[in-house]
């Protein structure tokens, strides 16, 4: 008689994570086509090739799925923000960081809305899922501190301006560069207003040629 052995706990955990990943990727597929608010567990199950009760076996609620999506998006955001820059001057790093931020946000509208807008009523990311975003904000604070800008109100101004620029670009010129072209000017204005070193603006950066994108 062959005695059955229980699955090793690490194998079961690996299988659970794999199933959750399939469900999360199916959820991204849904929201990229129909928007964040259109996420339906029935449609999600169909796309993942499973039943709706199976979805509940891995996620207790739709908000738990949003939380897993938020965590994935925040980790991608952190990776983008922490990648090396090809400039060394702290002021030029600021310019490059805004270009990178705008590129990240405009490349995936659903991801941007989930990370930076309260698009899902009643949803709040868990502390663990929000942690990469907190670390990324700390990096922004370090970049500003490197040129002597440490006052919290100026950090708030910076985040308000950068996300506002993205909102304008997405809403009024999707796939274009109308507001992207203003990045260097706005960084110069910000530094002139906030920098304790005075109104020295960053040296002009070479203009980058960007292919036009279709609306995210």
Image: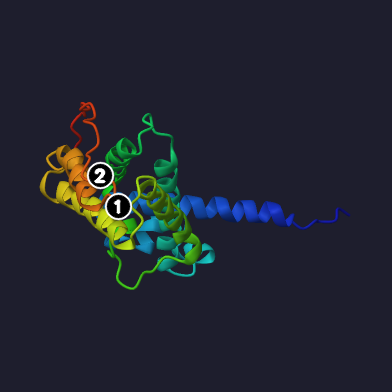
Q: Is residue 77 above or below residue 114?
A: above
Measured as percent of width and height from the top left, residue 67 is found at: 43, 62
Whether residue 47 is visible, yes or no, is no
Instruction: Please report the residue visible at 28 percent of the width from the left and 58 percent of the height from the top.
Output: 154
Identify the residue under disc 1: 112
Q: Please tell me which residue lies in front, 6 or 64.
A: 64
Q: Earlier in the sequence, mark 1 or mark 2?
A: 2
Crowdedness of circle 1 by 10 Å Cα count: few (<14), some, many (20+)? Answer: many
Q: Secondary structure at mark 1?
A: helix
Q: Secondary structure at mark 2?
A: helix
Give the colouring mode of the picture: rainbow
Q: Please tell me which residue lies in front, 210 or 147.
A: 147
Measured as percent of width and height from the top left, residue 29 is found at: 35, 49
Q: Please tell me which residue lies in front, 21 or 197.
A: 197
Crowdedness of circle 2 by 10 Å Cα count: few (<14), some, many (20+)? Answer: many
Instruction: Please report the residue visible at 47 percent of the width from the left and 59 percent of the height from the top.
Output: 131
> Is the C-beta separation of discs 1 and 2 under 8 Å?
yes
Across the whole image, how many numbered discs are drawn on residues?
2
Whether residue 147 is visible, yes or no, is yes
Residue 106, numbered circle: 2
Determine the CA span between mark 1 and mark 2: 7 Å
Quarter of the image containing the N terminus?
bottom right
Measured as percent of width and height from the top left, residue 166 is found at: 21, 49
Residue 81 shown left or right of residue 192 in the figure: right
Instruction: Please report the residue visible at 53 percent of the width from the left and 62 percent of the height from the top.
Output: 58
Residue 185 shown left or right of residue 73 in the figure: left
Quarter of the image containing the C terminus?
top left
Instruction: Please report the residue visible at 20 percent of the width from the left and 42 percent of the height from the top.
Output: 188
């Amino acid at each position: 008689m062959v005695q059955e052995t229980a699955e090793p706990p690490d194998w079961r955990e690996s299988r659970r994570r794999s199933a959750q990943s399939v469900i999360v990727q199916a959820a991204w597929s849904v929201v990229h086509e129909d928007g964040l608010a259109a996420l339906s567990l029935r449609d999600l199950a169909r796309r993942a090739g499973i039943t709706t009760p199976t979805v509940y076996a891995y996620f207790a609620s739709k908000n738990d799925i949003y939380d897993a999506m938020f965590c994935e998006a925040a980790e991608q955001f952190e990776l983008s923000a922490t990648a090396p820059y090809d400039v060394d001057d702290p002021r030029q790093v600021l310019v490059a960081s805004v270009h990178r931020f705008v590129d990240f946000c405009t490349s995936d509208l659903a991801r941007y809305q989930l990370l930076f807008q309260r698009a899902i009523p009643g949803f709040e990311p868990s502390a663990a899922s929000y942690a990469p975003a907190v670390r990324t904000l700390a990096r922004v604070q370090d970049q500003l501190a490197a040129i002597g800008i440490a006052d919290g109100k100026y950090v708030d101004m910076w985040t308000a301006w950068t996300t506002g620029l993205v909102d304008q670009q997405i809403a009024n010129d999707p796939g274009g560069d109308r507001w992207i072209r203003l990045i260097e000017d706005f960084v110069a204005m910000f530094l002139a207003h906030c920098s304790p070193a005075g109104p020295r603006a960053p040296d002009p950066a070479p203009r980058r040629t960007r292919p036009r994108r279709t609306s995210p």
